[in-house]
Image (cartoon, rainbow, N blue to C red):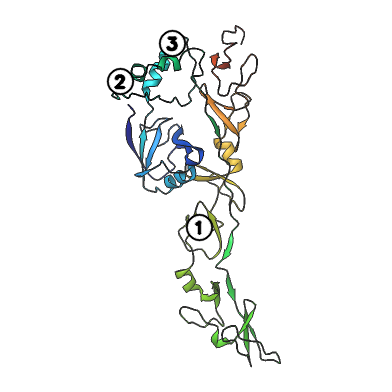
Amino acid sequence: MEMAYNVTLNGPGPWGFRLQGGKDFNMPLTISRITPGSKAAQSQMNQGDLVVAIDGVNTDSMTHLEAQNKIKSASYNLSLTLQKKDLKIYIYIYFLVSFGILQTAPAPVHSYTPANTEPASRPPWVTDESFSQKFAPGKTTTTVTKNILPRASPLAPAIARGTIQRAERFPASNRTPLCGHCNSIIRGPFLVAMGRSWHPEEFNCAYCKTSLADMCFVEEQNSVYCERCYEQFFAPTCSRCHTKIMGEVMHALRQTWHTSCFVCAACKKPFGNSLFHMEDGEPYCEKDYIALFSTKCHGCDFPVEAGDKFIEALGHTWHDTCFICAVCHVNLEGQPFYSKKDKPLCKKHAHAINV
């Protein structure tokens, strides 16, 4: 029977573990890597455990990014409900591998539910009469899960909201413009702002009515405001420095940032409009993400990059096109396979001497 347990990591982050899966990948959220010496490594959590809840919120409907953001929002402590792997099937598979009947990889092993359900305490090879046939030699009893590494997230262009402006004064002249406020002809000195002309006495903050004739102002929703009122009522808050944003606003991870505050966690350089990756709740530029977190394919020794399809088998990661028989090079994705000296073999060459 699967065991659920709770883990609380003392903040702040980084927490030291990596997720895989999510609703958008049609895979449950699981712990895919734990950094040695990290807070996660010092807890009882294990690689491969299912993440049932994050800070009390069930993860069944969470996408990968939503789960990352939920973890990132935990600033003090991070509370996780985890579920250990079901060991019953693994015990039986291990029994088969001791006797050389079956070679498996660390891919998910799915339990079979018999038509006539008996008490859950009884193992499936007792309650399911067809269980032995499902795991008989020569049957495709193990399929290796193909995954797609999440692509980098694009950044929306920074929006020039809250730009501070100042009206320009013009003396009376033969020119008679219309006032942008009262739509009457201006006879005398006037102001020019936002491409329109104004009576000086009518160019005021829409909230506190302070004259903006000789003050800086900000345009918002077709009205003008003094800097103080705009900051109080309209300016978004930066998710990093928690101060109000005046000027360009960066939208990323469903939050707002100063363009200078949304930076790579490693090199501290602003992203601008570049792509970024999320790892342990922190954003990284493409270069640093590959250098710090990319996994090399065990077959070709090249990195498994964003968007690549990959397979986890024999304790290693492989490009889907690199998981092949070491003798005849036939692709083994979704096929029963054996191993020798840490190399995959097809059934035909399972007993090859020279590998």
Q: Kindly report the distance in space between the C-alpha atoms of the residues bearing marks 1 and 2.
A: 53 Å
Nearest-to-viewer mark from 1 and 2: 2
Q: Kindly report the distance in space between the C-alpha atoms of the residues bearing marks 1 and 3.
A: 56 Å
Where is 101 relative to 258, above or below?
above
Residue 105 on image: x %, y %: 49, 21
Earlier in the chain: of badge 2 and badge 3, it is: 3
- For the N terminus, give its image quadrant: top left
Nearest-to-viewer mark from 1 and 3: 3
Secondary structure beneath disc 2? loop
Residue located 65% across and 77% down the image: 195
Earlier in the chain: of badge 1 and badge 3, it is: 3
Name the kind of residue labelled 1 in the image: Thr
Secondary structure beneath disc 1? strand
Nearest-to-viewer mark from 2 and 3: 2
Where is 147 relative to 206, above or below?
above
Query: Could you tell me if the residues under marks 1 and 2 are in contact, i.e. CB atoms within 8 Å?
Result: no
User: Mark 1 highlights which residue?
Assistant: 256
User: Mark 3 highlights which residue?
Assistant: 98
Residue located 51% across and 73% down the image: 227
User: Mark 2 highlights which residue?
Assistant: 122
Q: Looking at the image, can residue 268 be seen?
A: yes
Residue located 37% across and 29% down the image: 84
Residue located 39% across and 27% down the image: 85
